[in-house]
Amino acid sequence: MKQYISFLLLVFTGLSCWSCKDDVERPALVTSEIELAVPKNDVSIDLDKVRQITFAWQEAFLVDKYNLLLSNSEDMSSPVVVEARRTPHLISSSDMNDIAAKLGIASGYTGKIYWTVQSGKSSQPSSAEIRSLMVTRLMAQPLTPAKDTTLELDYEAMDTEVKFSWEPMPDTESYQLLISANADLSDPLIDMEVEKTSTALTYSQLQEMVDNKAAGLKRYKANTLYWNVKVGDRLMANSAWRFKLYGTKIFTDVRGDESITYKVAVISNGDSEVVWLAENLRTTKLNTGESLICEGQENDKSQCFPAEEAKKSATTLVPDAIRKVAGMYYRIGLIGDNSSSVTWPNLLAPEGWRVPELQDFVNLAKASLDVCDYLEVLRCPEVYPSLQIGDKKLKKDLMNSWGMNMAPCGTNRDGSLYIKEFGDLDGLHMVFAINSVSQFATLEIAAATAKGGARAIALGKNAPIVVRLIYTGDDK
C-alpha cells in the first residue's frame, strides 16, 4: 500500500512540474537590424576612376547570407539583387557598370542608385536604412562577343565572321582592338586599328592565332582569351572581357606523299579535356613515311588492309555500314619488333599523338555514362539500324552526339586472317587497339551492370584491329 501511495505522489509531482513549465514565459529571440557602413550616403562614384566599390555593413546575429539590393527608386522597387556571403562585399567597376545599365543609366552619364541590405532569409533582419549613390557610368564598354562567350571554329565554315563591337566614345574616330592570352593584355595576338565601333574577324583569322606556335595556344583544347578596346593610352573596360576559343576540330596527317584529314573530338573528363581522333586511323605508312605492307587481308604478311576489303570469312564481307567507317585494319604485332617490348605505337602514331591505354577507354566509357546508359553518345547510328542491342533500346537523339563515330568493327581472339568476332551490325562490342600486342579494349554493355563499360580482352596473334589515337600536344 505504501508503494502504491508513493507512486501516486511521484505521478502528481511530475504533472505539477509539467504544468509549471507551461506557465514559464520564454523571452523572444530578438535580432537587431543590419547597420549599413560604406559607402556613405550620397557618395559620388565615377566608374572610370575606380576599379571596385566596397559595400559593407555590420553583421547581424545568426545571419550567414545577405542580399545587397540596388534600385533606381527610393522605395527599392524592381531591384538588382546581389548575393553576398559576408561583409565587406566588393563589386568591380565593370560589374557595377552593368548594374547601372540595368537601372537605366546611359553610358557616360550619372544617375542615382539606392541601396540597402537584407538577410538572405525573409524571417531574419534587414536594414531599416536606404542609402543613395551618384554613379557615373563608364564612358563606353565592349559589347560583343559577350563576356564568357565560347567560340568553336567550324572547319567547314571558315569564312564565318565574329563581330567585335563596342559603344562609341565622344569625339573619337579611331579605336585599337586588342586580343591577348593574358588578362593584362600583354603580348597581344591581335593589335589592330579600327575606324568604326566594330570590326569582324573570320574563323580563318582566329585559326591563324591558334596555329601560330609562338602564341602558345592549345590546338584543340579550350583557350581562354581576353579582349578590350584602347583609345589613346586608356582602355575602355577596367578589366578585359574574357572568351573561350576552340580551334577547328580536324587533324591533317601528312606522311610522305600521303595526306589524310581526320575529324577530332574534345571530350570532357571531369575537370580536364581529352582530345580523341574521332575516326579510325587510315594511314598506309609509318610515321617516318615508310610504307606498310598492304597486300590484302588474306596475305598473312600484310601489316594492314583497307576496310572496304574486310571479310568475316573467305566468302563473307563485313557489313557495308561498318566497312564505311572502319578505316584501316592493322596487324599491329607485325609492325616493328614487339618481341621484347611494345614498339608498334611509336612507329604508327604521328608526332603529338599516342595510342590509348586501356584506362583511356575506361575513362571514356565512364564519362559517357554521365549522360547515357548504353554509350549512345559514342556510337555511329548507321551501324545500329535497329537502335537496339539485345534487349537494350538505344536513344536515337543521343546517338553519336559526341561525334566519336565508333562502331563494332571486329577482330578475333584466335589469330585468324578474318574478322570473325565483334563485327556485326547492332553489335555489342566496339573494339580498338591499345598499347599492347596481346590485348585490345572493348567498349560494351556489360552484362553485370546492364550498362556501358570498357575492359580488355585477349587479342589473337597478328589479328586485325582498328586504331584510334589521343592528342598529347595540348598537354605541355
Image: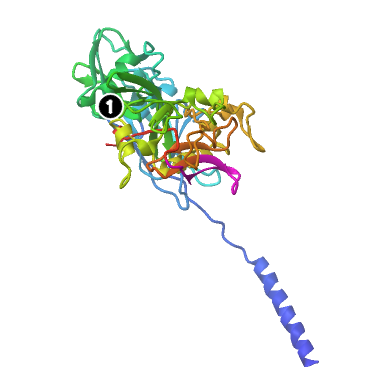
Vertical placement of residue 473 versus 202, above or below: below
Q: Residues within 10 Å of mark 1 (few under 14, many from 20)?
A: few
Does the magenta run of residues contain 337?
A: no
Could you tell me residue 309's position as x and y percent? 48, 24
For the point 70% across and 70% down, the residue is: 19
Residue 15, image quadrant: bottom right
For the point 25% across and 26% down, the residue is: 49
Main SS of residues in magenta: strand
Does the magenta run of residues contain 456?
A: yes
The amino acid type, in three-letter code, at marker 1 is Glu
- Foreground of the two, 94 or 147: 147
Could you tell me residue 464's position as x and y percent? 45, 34
Residue 347, image quadrant: top left
Whether residue 139 is visible here, answered yes or no, is: no
Residue found at the very far right of the displayed protein = 1
The residue that disc 1 covers is: 290
- Foreground of the two, 452 or 255: 255
- Foreground of the two, 285 or 173: 285
Could you tell me residue 366's position as x and y percent? 49, 42
Total labels: the figure holds: 1
Q: Which quadrant of the rendered structure holds the N terminus?
A: bottom right
Magenta segment boundaries in residue numbering? 443-461
Q: Is residue 364 left or right of residue 424?
A: left
Vertical placement of residue 162 versus 408, above or below: above
Q: Is residue 96 left or right of residue 316?
A: left
